[in-house]
Amino acid sequence: EVQLVQSGAEVKKPGESLKISCKTYGYSFTNFWIGWVRQMPGKGLQWMGVIYPGDSDTKYNPSFEGQVSISADRSISTAYLQWRSLKASDTAIYYCARHNGGSYSPRFPDYWGQGTLVTVSS
Amino acid sequence: EVVLTQSPGTLSLSPGERATLSCRASESVSGTFLAWYQQKHGQAPRLLIYGASSRATGVPDRFSGSGSGTDFTLTISRLEPEDFAVYYCQQYVISPQTFGQGTKLEIK
């Protein structure tokens, strides 16, 4: 059974760094793109970017490039989303999602994690 | 980026009725690279439809998708109480992938 299990909720101050995780089970981690989707409070879904763990190829939404980093550790089948300096506007739920499709291009997200709530407040 | 516009913003219907949700793209979504998701309050999105009309594993057959190019539709033939939720369309052919703003399906 495919499962994506995310790390727990975080409360941080502006300017702090953060790395959240998404551990995967039940499929070959290196053969599927995995990415992150943001949902700000009371709002819709925003696709942030993906990584292909097989070769670490990464694609970012231009709106998020330079603001976050997406990485993966093949040895523990885990993907990460990282910030160097958080802002209050980063407050949101972040979902990881496996993307269907082959190595050439990610397709639709088919399995989702439960979400990680990140709260940034002074 | 491709802008997806969903209509209506809110749809008020009763159990047993038919729901028709629309998603229009600002440019052609090459063929049928469009998906639909259901999100209930406090839960992660759930994949319903991919390739515009293919149901994901375990999705009841009362859910169906249609369309191509710039106009897509999600139809729920007979609403069940558990179907009242927010629905999002998503295109995944042009990077960055984008979602519509959502349609809230509420009980009348």
Image (cartoon, coloured by chain):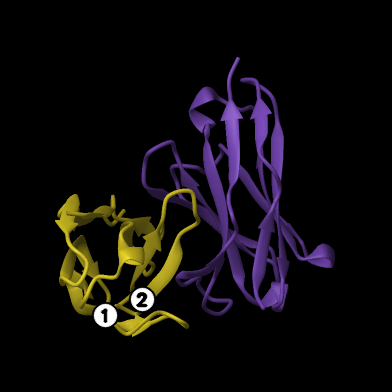
Q: Quadrant of residue B21?
A: bottom left
Count the marks.
2
- The chain carrying label 1 is B
Q: Which chain is painted in yellow? A: B
Q: Which residue is mark 2?
A: B49
Going from the N terminus, do you reach mark 2 or mark 1 first?
A: 2
**Residue A73 location in percent, x, y?**
78, 60
Compared to residue B88, the image places residue A84 above or below, namely above
Q: Secondary structure at mark 2?
A: strand
Q: Nearer the viewer, residue B65 or A49?
A: B65
Q: Residues within 10 Å of mark 2 (few under 14, many from 20)?
A: many
Q: Nearer the viewer, residue A20 or B105?
A: B105
The answer to whether the residue labelled 2 contacts the one labelled 1, judged by CB atoms less than 8 Å apart, is yes
**Residue A109 location in percent, x, y?**
49, 67
**Residue A85 location in percent, x, y?**
64, 27
In the rendered image, the residue lying farthest to the right is A75
Q: Residue at x 37, y 77 (%)?
A: B50
Q: Which chain is painted in purple? A: A
Q: Which residue is mark 1?
A: B64
Q: Is residue A108 visible?
A: yes
Cα separation between marks 2 and 1: 7 Å
Q: Residues within 10 Å of mark 1 (few under 14, many from 20)?
A: many
- The chain carrying label 2 is B
